[in-house]
Image (tube, helix red, strand yellow):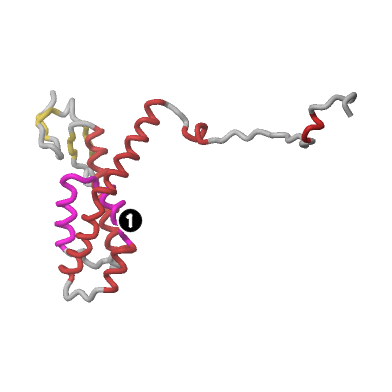
Amino acid sequence: MARRVTCRICKKKGDTDTFFRVTDDKGKNKYYCSQKEYDNYNKEIENRYNLMKYIAEDILDYQDGQIVPPVLVKRISELRRFYEYEVIKKCFEICKEDIQYWMGAKNFTNEYGMISYIMKIVEGNMNDTYNKWKFQQNQQQRQEVSGVDVEIINEVPTKNITVKADNGILDFLDEDDL
């Protein structure tokens, strides 16, 4: 007999027979609507962690254990309402040189001002980065659907071309004409 359970992500009600079960380290069962939903949730957590780690270590040059400013976390979560973590990270990668230049060129009185300035740089480039990312995603989907191998299309065939010596008008004359 199945018992009633709730999905940990979407809070949807179901039973143990239809939901996907995961047993944690302590032996406690956790239920999710499907394995796909569970995998997407874990991927989302991993992408967020990678983004925050990239910002802290590569952009802000923080040491391991330093606290990321809460205003940065809040601004990232506001961007996350529409953009994927992958897109946000890509935008930070594109803007890295600009951010580091302005962090060194401007004298910020506090972290709040510095984070606000950084986020304005990123927000200014976010739509362009999103459009590029979306175009790449569409291209990948089309490639997968059509089954076309891009490497074969991009391969340029090479032909051996032989060039005959140009003798001018002599090529048109017969032996009798000479």
- Residue at x-position 18% and y-position 25%: 17
Residue 110 higher or lower than 52, as above or below: below
Q: Hey, which quadrant is residue 12 in on the image?
A: top left
Q: Position of residue 25 (x, y in %)?
A: 24, 46
Residue nearer the viewer, 90 or 41: 90
Could you say whether the residue bearing mark 1 is in a helix, strand or loop?
Answer: helix
- In the image, 167 versus 173, the foreground residue is 173
Instruction: Report whether 153 appears left or right of 38.
Output: right
The answer to if 75 sits in the magenta stretch is yes
Q: Quadrant of the N terminus?
A: top left
How many numbered marks does the figure carry? Answer: 1
Q: Which residue is mark 1?
A: 94
Q: Residue at x 27, y 70 (%)?
A: 103
Amino acid at pointer 1: Ile
Residue 157 seen anywhere in this rendered image of the structure:
yes
Snapshot quadrant of residue 69: bottom left
Residue 63 seen anywhere in this rendered image of the structure: no
Q: In x, y percent, where is residue 59?
A: 30, 63
Q: Which residues are magenta?
A: 70-96
The residue carrying pointer 1 sits among few (fewer than 14), some (14 to 19) or many (20 or more) residues within 10 Å by Cα, namely some
* Percent x, y of residue 128: 27, 48
